[in-house]
Image (tube, grey):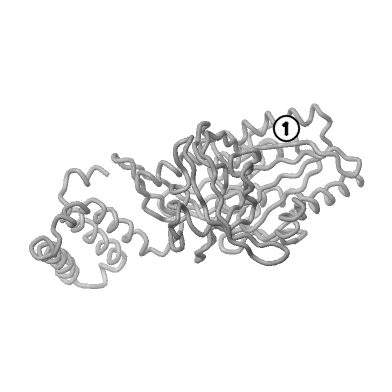
Amino acid sequence: MKFLKKYSFGDVITIVFVLLIGMVVGAVIVLRKQDFFLDNEQYISSKFEKIKTLLSKEYVTPEKLEENQEEMAEGSIAWYVAWLGDPFTTYLTKKKNTMLFNNLKEQSGVEGIGVYLEKEENSEVVTVSEVIKYGPAYDAGMKKGDQILAIEGTDIQGKALEDVIEMIRGEKGSTVTLQISRKTMTGESDFFITIPRKEINIPSVASELQEFEGKKIGIFSISSISEHTSQLFVKESLELMQQGMQGLVLDLRGNGGGYLEEATRFLGHFLPKGSLTVKTKYFAFKDKNFYSDGVGELKDFPMVVLIDQLTASASEIIAQALREQGVTIVGMKSYGKGSIQSVQEFADGSSLKYTVGERFSAKDFSINGTGIVPDVEIPFDAENYEKNLFDNQLDLAKKTLATLLEKN
């Protein structure tokens, strides 16, 4: 941020706390005497100045205070934002901000081990939600559902998911040793696994054509709603249509979302041009409706959408819009994120990601806090997958689609 370089550490802290007081009291200032707030603001500022002075004069290791001034300033900003209690409003350091946008740009040349990780809210457990086929982790034997306990001997309990990801990533050619907990038919086992880091290309769309009960079914796994998702989907779907695809399963499990506008572009492959896809309502901006501008080339193809507890945000927009068109939803109830975030980047590479509005489906349904309940609910059988690589949720989705194809 620009002011980090312009002001001293003490000035930064003062600014942050002055902002805090201003934010808290701004809504009720007309009901109280202005002098009270000025006095209170001055009291906070003077108290913090006194703390700064005491530390600078009397702290036992002044060199540590000097070395950590920038981190202390960054931390004060992060805590200020965190006190809102909104898990989707957060201050991102330069490193975390870069990670956020890299994940949405589908860049090739990402150096790592080839896994997707998840960490549910209020949980200390980091779990492998997907292993990229033929990637380093896949070749080393890592499985979906594995829980990571430690990285290079360091316990990760209590660490943020972004920090865990950063610890695992590294330069290609190096290795990383993970302590893993895995549930099996006979119980749990803990073991260590060493995985080489390699350059990995991670597109947001993967597809394959499967023969199932005499039907040719396209399986489309959408890992995120990134900047090229719609474009990649066109390429993949055209290839499968040329191979005789009769229907499709849209697998949105583990899809944490992405860009709202890209979700609308993606829906253009399934909805008639001009169809209302999502409504947005803001506090500080004008409300806006989004409409499909695609050609709807797949609108007449029978399909099933597969979701789980990690299907969130922009992927929930897609699932709900298709449900309102009569598409069957299979899996488990989705995450339930119906808020909209904006990102303000600063000169030093850090950013503020903050909630600015809410979104609703074409039929005014809000998923926020409630999620999407599937038409056909089925929990994921992790033990069966571990033992036989059998995906029971996907199998049910294919059976549901095969029934639809048979009727047609």
Residue 169, image x and y in percent? 47, 43
Q: Quadrant of the C terminus?
A: top right
Quadrant where the N terminus lies? top left
Give the labeled residue for mark 1: 237
Q: Locate residue 222, reporting x and y percent.
A: 64, 42
| Of residues 134 and 4, the one drawn nearer to the viewer in this rendering | 134
| In the rendered image, the vertical position of residue 353 relative to residue 173, given as above or below | below
The answer to which image quadrant residue 242 occupies is top right
Q: Nearer the viewer, residue 361 or 153?
A: 153
Number of callouts in the render?
Answer: 1
Percent x, y of residue 3: 21, 46
Determine whether 212 is above or below 332 in the image. above
| Residue under the point 84% across and 50% down | 399
Would residue 19 be found to the left or right of residue 7 on screen? right
Residues packed near mark 1 inside 10 Å, few (<14), some (14 to 19) or many (20 plus)? many
Secondary structure of the residue carrying numbered label 1:
helix
Q: Residue 191 versus residue 143: which sits nearer the camera? A: 191
Q: Is 247 on the left-hand or right-hand side of 235? A: right
Work out whether residue 317 can be spotted: no
Residue 295 appears in the figure: yes
Residue farthest along the left direction in this orientation: 57
Q: Amino acid at mark 1?
A: Ser
- In the shown orientation, is residue 246 left or right of residue 325? right
Q: In the depicted view, which residue is nearer to us: 142 or 96?
A: 142
Where in the figure is residue 23, as x and y percent of width and height?
Answer: 29, 61
Query: Residue at horizontal 44%, vertical 63%?
Result: 158
